[in-house]
Amino acid sequence: MPTWTKPSTANYGTRMTDETHGLLDTNILIRRREIDHAQLPAVMSIGAVTLAELSAGPHHTSDPQERARRLDLLQRVEAEFEPLPFDAEAARAFGRVSAAVLAAGRKPRRRLADLMIASIAVSNRLPLFTASPGGFDGLGDLLTVVPVALPNDQ
């Protein structure tokens, strides 16, 4: 389900193609204000796992200003997006994602949230936009990973 459309590229009369619709990794949401939006899809979605990561974020700092910044981000994301669920299809995709990661010689448990996000992308046939594409090595047969450069990477 599309949840955010760039006003200049909205196509209100027809369903958007997968090339213009993508799932955003958590790291994109955290740094989205700094990212060149030309790198992002016209229609952006997030997964419920991303919302879970952002919900946990404020509890992982003792700095009141950082906690306030993280809460602000969480509230903005909750207001802007309707997350795609980690549903039965995503759970089935998670099995394939785990198998691919194991076949690549990596340990799936170390990146559980990332692999669950990847599974949501696979089950919804969406490319995954991320600032850390290496975290998804081994998934090329299942998922299109779109690298997004952060300002200090450009």
Image: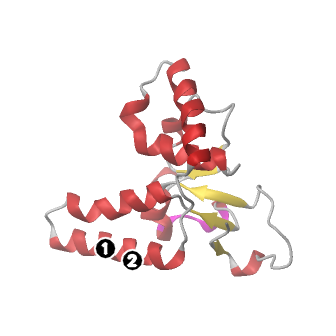
Residue 71: in magenta span: no
Q: Amino acid at mark 1?
A: Leu
Position above or below: 101 against 67: above
Q: Foreground: 109 or 88? A: 88
Secondary structure type for disc 2: helix
**What's the magenta region?**
34-38
Q: Which mark is residue 71?
A: 1
Checking the image for residue 75, the label placed there is 2
Main SS, magenta residues = helix
Please name the residue shown 54% across and 72% down the image.
81
The image position of residue 118, as x and y in percent, is 56, 44
- Label 1, secondary structure: give it: helix
Q: Which mark is residue 54?
A: none
Q: Residue furthest right?
A: 13
Above or below, comparing residue 23 to residue 119 in the picture: below
Q: Amino acid at mark 2?
A: Gln
- Residue 68 image point, x, y percent: 25, 75
Can residue 87 be spotted in the picture?
yes
Pointers 1 and 2 in contact (CB under 8 A)?
A: yes
Residue 146 in sight: no
